[in-house]
């Protein structure tokens, strides 16, 4: 695990997945400061642990972003009733039928 590759991976992850503007520069400055602060370490086990922590953090950010993208692709948080109505209308039209236009407000008044 080379320090330079971990640092670059962390910055790439930051650039790709973290917010815009001052938030991104604050994170970038913090990462640079931490790597500079620990540049003089000589304990190989401690260096390895710190690099592993940085690599794990980059992996976590990437995984959270990927998970969020999957949720949006599956439309978990979106009301799908309009999509289902459109699909039913299209299916009915394929076999030569037409669904009546019924509004939910009309049903509630009855």
Image (tube, rainbow, N blue to C red):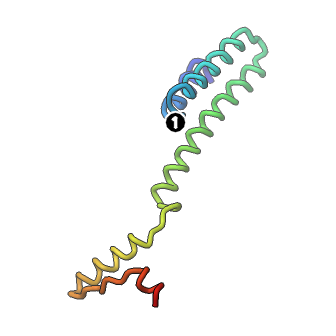
Image point 28% across, 84% down: which residue?
92
In the rendered view, would you say 39 is above or below 82? above
Q: Quadrant of the N terminus?
A: top right
User: Which secondary structure lies at badge 1?
Assistant: helix
Please indicate whether residue 70 sits to the left or right of residue 89 in the image: right
* Rendering quarter of residue 36: top right
Where residue 8 appears, as percent x and y from the top left, is 54, 22
14 shown above or below 41: below
Q: Which residue is mark 1?
A: 17
Q: Quadrant of residue 23?
A: top right
Q: Quadrant of residue 93?
A: bottom left
Residue 48, percent from left and from top: 72, 23
Q: Position of residue 42 (x, y in %)?
A: 76, 11
Which residue is depicted at the point 60% across and 25% down? 27
Instruction: Return the residue nearer the eye: 46 or 32.
Output: 32
Q: Nearer the viewer, residue 35 or 96?
A: 96
Residue at 61% x, 20% y: name it. 2
Where is 50 relative to 77, above or below?
Answer: above
Q: Where is residue 50 drawn, in percent x and y?
A: 72, 24
Relative depth, front residue between 108 and 37: 108
Q: Which of these two is toward me, 14 or 46?
A: 14
Q: Residue furthest front?
A: 109
């Amino acid at each position: 695990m080379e320090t330079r590759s971990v640092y670059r991976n962390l910055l790439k992850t930051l650039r790709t997945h973290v917010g815009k503007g001052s938030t991104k520069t604050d994170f970038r400055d913090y990462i640079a400061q931490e790597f500079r602060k620990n540049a003089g370490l000589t304990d190989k086990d401690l260096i390895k642990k710190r690099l592993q922590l940085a690599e794990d953090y980059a992996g976590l950010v990437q995984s959270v972003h990927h998970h969020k993208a999957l949720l949006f692709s599956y439309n978990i948080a979106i009301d799908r009733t309009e999509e289902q109505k459109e699909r039913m209308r299209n299916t009915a039209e394929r076999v030569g039928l037409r669904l009546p236009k019924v509004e939910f407000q009309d049903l509630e008044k009855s």
